[in-house]
Every structure is written in C-alpha cells, then in structure tokens.
Image (tube, rainbow, N blue to C red):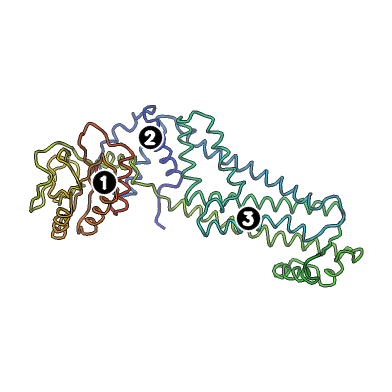
Amino acid sequence: MAFKNHDFNDLVRLEQLRHIETGRAKTLSYAGVANMESYPVAGFSYAAFLERLLNRAHHLIHDNHLDDILQQPEKLFVRAGRVILVLATILGGLAAINATGDSSTLNIYWLLVVLLGFNFFSMLLWSAGITLGIQGLSSGIAAQLARWLPFLQLKKKEKDSIGTLAAHAWWETCLFGKVGKWRISLLTHQFWMIYLLAGMGTLILLMLAKQYDFVWGTTLLPENSLPELTRLLAAPMELIGLASPDSQQIAASRIGAGMQDASIRNAWAKFLVGALIVYGVLPRIILALFAFLMLKLSEYRYKLDLYLPYYVTLRQSLIANEFMASVIDRDPGVAQEQPVQVARKGHNRHLPEEALVIGIELDNHIIWPKGMVCQENVADQETLMRAVEMIKKSRYSLLIGVAAHRLPDRGVQRIIKKLTALASGQIWLVLLQNNAAIPITESRKQAWFRLAQASAIPAEHVLS
C-alpha cells in the first residue's frame, strides 16, 4: 500500500466542514484562507488536492475554534459504546444467575442454551447481514442503540447549529457505508464477548462458592442424543487441552441417576467453562479482530466524493480550473469544419489547446465562455449523427456543453454516454447558463456531476 500523509480522521474533518459550510457558511471566518482561494497548481492530482483541502481545513478550524465541536460526536459515540458494554456485563451476569437459580442442580444444556443460544443466533444474523450486505442484520440492537443514543441527544439542540451539522457529518461518514458497517460490527462483537465473559465469570464465582450437581435429560429426543452431542462438543475442546466428562460420567449425570461425586461435578464444570470459551468467547474474539482489521482497511480505502458540488467548487477555486462566461454572437447551431481555439484565463493550463465543442439541446440564449464556439448543437437525430461523425474524425479533446438550469433526463444521459464512448481525447463537461447572474442550484449541479461520474468524466473536467 502506498504511503499516505493523512488518516481517516482528516477525511472525517473535511466532511464535517463540508456540512458546516453548506449549512452555516455565513457564520464562519475565512480570513485565514482568503489568499489561498486564488492560488493555482498545474494539473490535477487527488493527493495534491487533498493536501490543499487539509491545509484549508486547518486554517478554518483554527480561525473558528472548531476543534472541540468536531471531536464531540466521536466522544459521544465512545461514551455510548461504554454504556452498552456495561449493559452487556450486567446482562451476562444476570443471565448466569437466572440460569442457575436457587437450586443446587444445574441442567447443563439449559445453561448452554441460555448463555450461547442467543450469541449463536446473533452470529448467524451478522454473517447473513455481511454476506447479503444488509446492515440492519449485521448490527445488533445494542450496537444500533449506541449509534442512535448520541444522535437523539443532539436532536434536542438547534437543528442547523454548527455542532449538529458536524455530528450529522460524523454519523454519515463513520457509522454508515462500509466504514460504519465494520465499526458497528466491531461494537456488536465486543458486546457479546463482554456478555459471555461476564456470564462465565459469574458462573465460576457461583461454582466456587456453592456446590452444584450437573444433570441432563430429554423427553422428545432419543436417549443417546444428548450424550452424543456432549462427545461432539468435547472433541474440539480436547484438542486444546480442556477436559470433558467421559461416557461413564455422562451416564451418571442422567436425571434420576443418583448423587454425583466430586470428579463428576469437576468434569462437568470444566466442560461448561470450556464450551463457553470454545463456542462463545473465541469465535467472538476472532470476529472482533476480523471486524477491526476490515474497519481499518475500509478507513484506509475511504475517499472523498469529488463529484459533490462542494468539492467541485473548491477544486475550481484551489486549482483555478474555471472559465469566464460571456455572451457571443455566434448561433450555437452553426457547425464548423475545424476545431476552435479555447480562450482561457492566463493561469489556467487545464483546458485543452484545441477541442471539438458539442452542445446538447441548447437554445439561442445560452451563454458560452468567451472564445468558445459550439460546432454542433445536438437537438435531434440528424444533428446527433453529424456530431457522431465529427467526433469519429476528430483527434482532439471533446467539450460537451449542457444547459445547467435543466435536470439531465434519460435522453440527455444516453446522448452524452454515446458521445463520450466515441471520443479519442480528453472529455470535458461544461455547465452553461442563460443568465450568468443566477447561480446554478445545488440540486442541478449534483445531477450533472452524477451524470459525469456515470459517463466516466473526471470531476476535475466538470466546469461550472
């Protein structure tokens, strides 16, 4: 794996800032990043862009004293997790006490069902949830409670406050998706591991302080079913050196067989503790380690969604990938034979020197960037075929102009995918407007960015 000079927590802070700036930008101070906004860099690189974002975030967090606010959601989740683990300890102890009761006789299989049955059922649900990708199955009730307790606490605060926005961002990033699946899975395994350890510890204390006779019996099952089950359960335990009752001791423990001696009681006590370790605690430790490793791997692989309008806007300002829009006289429906030169700002080295410019269902009032002339406006099947022929013959990059004030319908999506599939050079998507004074709404931007993503157009090649 390549070395990275950032960790997952850095990306979480960027997502928290995205939510805060989207909802409460007017309340923030941008003095520390004022000079940074116009600083250009050559070429686009995710690592370089991320470094710029982290540098900008550092200044914003410092200038607005956001450190404590951004850390608060994680602290609340950790606190809720500790409460859940304390609850697991209490429940495990109570389960053991309930299963033993006041009697001096213990039904060995009833004890195993009480302490291991729900745990085994939980592991089955978790495995099904992970395999089928159903997060509700892969996280238990206790883990879900740890997820929502802090959220319910924050709901009481102001809905659009900076703290609430930061908390929502942390929730979405850390508790949902692949990262959230493994984080909640880890807490689920920890819950059951503590439950089993507490139950086993309580049983050991009870057996140290009191003498118990262990018995077994059945009404509906065949007579030899439970002894055979005992031998099957004991086989893996014997491999790691844990003792188990022999056939005579098993027969002597049948309900109504009479009093037991110390060797029989000792053998069953060791079998009970060994079964809890082998079939309860060890699988949970293994699953917890697996969930922990998968959590770290998913955090390592996590990447920002650069097709979100927030990041595209920052890319255009931090990397200076933008254009100046102005009205030109040329009819966008008139085609030219040769590619045109694209005029750009002096510091912008991102747009291609020569490009084939194609419009998609544009009207005569659309505003093109200064110096950029549409060579074909696709409005029907005939113009689409002409555009296709031009792209097939062209060796240059392709610039596709679309009306940003419209939502892309399926027809537009099909046209763009068809054109991009034929292009031999780089592809750019230019979001055009009828009125430069009216900003493009976030929902419209988001729709076009997702179309660019579906058409394999890089986020840095979407111009607005």
Report which residue position mark 2 lands on. Answer: 22
On the picture, is 427 further left or further right than 372? right
Task: Give the labeled residue for mark 3.
Answer: 122
Amino acid under disc 2: Thr
Sooner in the amino-acid sequence: mark 2 or mark 3: 2
Mark 2 or mark 1, which has the lower sequence index? 2
- Between 464 and 128, the one lying in front of the other is 128
Q: Viewed as shown, does residue 450 lie left or right of 243?
A: left
Measured in 3D between alpha carbons, the distance from the residue under mark 2 to the one under mark 3, in whole angstroms, is: 40 Å
Q: What is the tally of numbered marks visible in this picture?
A: 3
User: Left or right: where does residue 133 sit relative to residue 109?
Assistant: left
At label 3, the amino acid type is: Ser
Q: Residue at x 77, y 57 (%)?
A: 111
Residue at x 40% of width, y 32% of height: 23
Residue 146 position by quadrant: top right
Instruction: Report whether 403 appears left or right of 27.
Output: left
Give the residue number, with chain letter if any, for mark 1: 462
Q: Position of residue 175 (x, y in %)?
A: 51, 45
Q: Earlier in the sequence, mark 3 or mark 1?
A: 3
